[in-house]
Image (cartoon, rainbow, N blue to C red):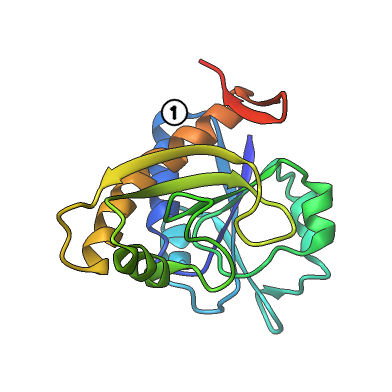
């Protein structure tokens, strides 16, 4: 299965996917796309000979208007949002219905929505005095963090002293959960049955 990974940050989830790609050989990351021209994750992509594009103007960039053509021409079958902070255009979502997934650093439907990304999420979780947090992978629809949930993994945060501690624990979970789900999708074992998402064994 050919995959496009969309990123905005340093790319630790991209690295986890690349490691899984090498180990499992069930999927191939063929392009990495960012909303930032100098995205740190591009260094990881470059080290692994993966093409990169930034969304915008100038050399090496593409516009949102030309994004569908790029995805089509490269044969992308699944889009993975791994810390991508922008909404995906409606025409791309419709064309890749149930073929775009996002990883969110909290247990949706709590602590999601516009502005809830990165440390903002963990600060909100910390202030709430929640005793568990975790990661959620969901299908992408037209709003932030509202698509059907594919998988979640919890982590105990009852003893943390800061949002940064929550971030560290959740990131470890993300690095386990995202490759697992992508691999299951590549094996055609993620199904929507009776309006719920199931992962087959």
Which residue corresponds to the image point at 70% horizontal and 61% vertical from the top-left?
A: 143
Q: Is residue 74 above or below residue 36?
A: above
Q: Is residue 59 above or below residue 201?
A: below
What residue did someone put label 1 on?
A: 24
Which residue corresponds to the image point at 44% horizontal and 49% vertical from the top-left?
A: 107
Q: Is residue 181 above or below residue 83?
A: above
Residue located farthest toward the top when viewing the structure as drawn = 201
The quadrant of the image that shows the N terminus is: top right
Q: x%, y% of residue 33?
A: 60, 63
Q: Secondary structure at mark 1?
A: helix
Which residue corresponds to the image point at 42% horizontal and 61% vertical from the top-left?
A: 11
Indicate the quadrant where residue 87 lies: bottom right
Which residue corresponds to the image point at 63% horizontal and 62% vertical from the top-left?
A: 144
Q: Nearer the viewer, residue 168 or 175?
A: 168
Locate residue 185 relative to residue 91 in the image: left or right. left
Indicate the quadrant where residue 126 lies: bottom left
Would you say residue 69 is visible in this rendering?
no
């Amino acid at each position: 299965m050919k995959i496009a990974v969309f990123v905005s940050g340093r790319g630790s989830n991209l690295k986890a996917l690349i490691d899984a790609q090498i180990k499992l050989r069930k999927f191939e990351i063929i392009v990495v796309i960012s909303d930032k021209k100098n995205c740190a994750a591009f260094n990881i992509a470059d080290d692994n000979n993966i093409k990169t594009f930034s969304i915008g103007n100038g050399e090496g960039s593409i516009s949102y208007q030309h994004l569908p053509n790029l995805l089509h021409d490269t044969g992308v079958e699944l889009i993975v949002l791994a810390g991508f902070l922008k909404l995906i255009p409606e025409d791309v979502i419709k064309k890749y219905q149930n073929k775009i997934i996002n990883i969110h650093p909290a247990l949706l439907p709590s602590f999601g929505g516009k502005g809830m990304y990165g440390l903002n999420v963990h600060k909100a979780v910390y202030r709430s005095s929640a005793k568990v947090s975790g990661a959620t992978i969901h299908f992408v629809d037209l709003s932030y963090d509202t698509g059907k949930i594919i998988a979640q993994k919890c982590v105990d945060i009852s003893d943390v002293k800061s949002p940064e501690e929550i971030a560290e624990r959740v990131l470890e979970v993300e690095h386990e959960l995202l490759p697992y789900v992508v691999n299951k999708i590549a094996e055609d074992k993620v199904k929507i049955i009776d309006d719920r998402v199931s992962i087959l064994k």
